Amino acid sequence: MSFDSLGLKPELLRAVADKGYTEPTPIQREAIPAVLAGRDVLAGAQTGTGKTAGFTLPLLQKLGSRSGRNPRALVLTPTRELAAQVAQSMVDYGKYGDLRTQVVFGGVSERPQISNLRNGCDILVATPGRLLDLCEQRAVSLAEVQTFILDEADRMLDMGFIRDIKRVLKMLPASRQNLMFSATYSDDI
Ligand code: AMP
């Protein structure tokens, strides 16, 4: 099976071809059409399965082109390394489009992140604590988020982020698309 049959637009297929990928991975075959169709997705996927492109590609397609100041998609990750990696994927796969991605995480100064957010973004990739800080300061609003993605949900719970995640959920519009990726599925998840 090739990427062509997944319903992705030419500029995304070009970015995929630039990466040298010839075939979608199993998670990409399942997730891409489901996300494009607007469905909620719960996926069991470890790192290394291609899960990032599995949500990044259809998300970029759904968002289309840049619009407004506040993010229309939010990706929560447990660590800053993963946040940076996911944001880089958005930039790589989105290189033939004009969508704006911003990334915020703790452990570094807030100021450059606040000033980046002021320029507007379509996609926000964040770790939970820093995101909540920036929301409290009104540096960003989550009121326009249409797609919410929880990446490595099991690690988020292991790291004690459940209360932060619940606080973030309260700030999101009730009507939205939800995608969750987790390597394991315990009762808590
Ligand atoms: P991930 O599981 O999202 O962390 O991706 C693991 C690695 O697989 C990354 O280095 C991707 O660049 C790569 N990758 C993603 N999709 C494909 C694909 N369809 N074919 C080959 N490599 C891929």
Image: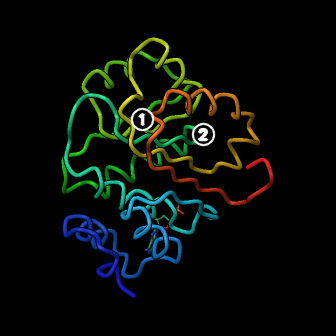
- Return the residue found at the far front: 175
Disc 1 CB within 8 Å of nearest ligand 1 atom: no
Residue 69 at x, y = what percent?
A: 26, 28
Spatial separation of the CA atoms under disc 2 and disc 1: 12 Å
Residue that extends furthest to the bottom in the rendered view of this protein = 1
Helix, strand or loop for disc 2: loop
Q: Quadrant of residue 117?
A: top left
Dot placed on the residue nearer the N-terminal end, 2 or 1: 2
- Secondary structure beneath label 1: strand
Q: Quadrant of the N terminus?
A: bottom left
Q: Which mark is residue 23?
A: none
Closer to the camera, 139 or 174?
Answer: 174
Residue found at x 19% / y 57%: 96
What residue sits 53% from the left and 40% below the top? 76
- The residue singled out by tag 2 in the image is 79
Q: Which residue is mark 1?
A: 103
Q: Which residue corresponds to the image point at 49% horizontal and 76% vertical from the top-left?
A: 25
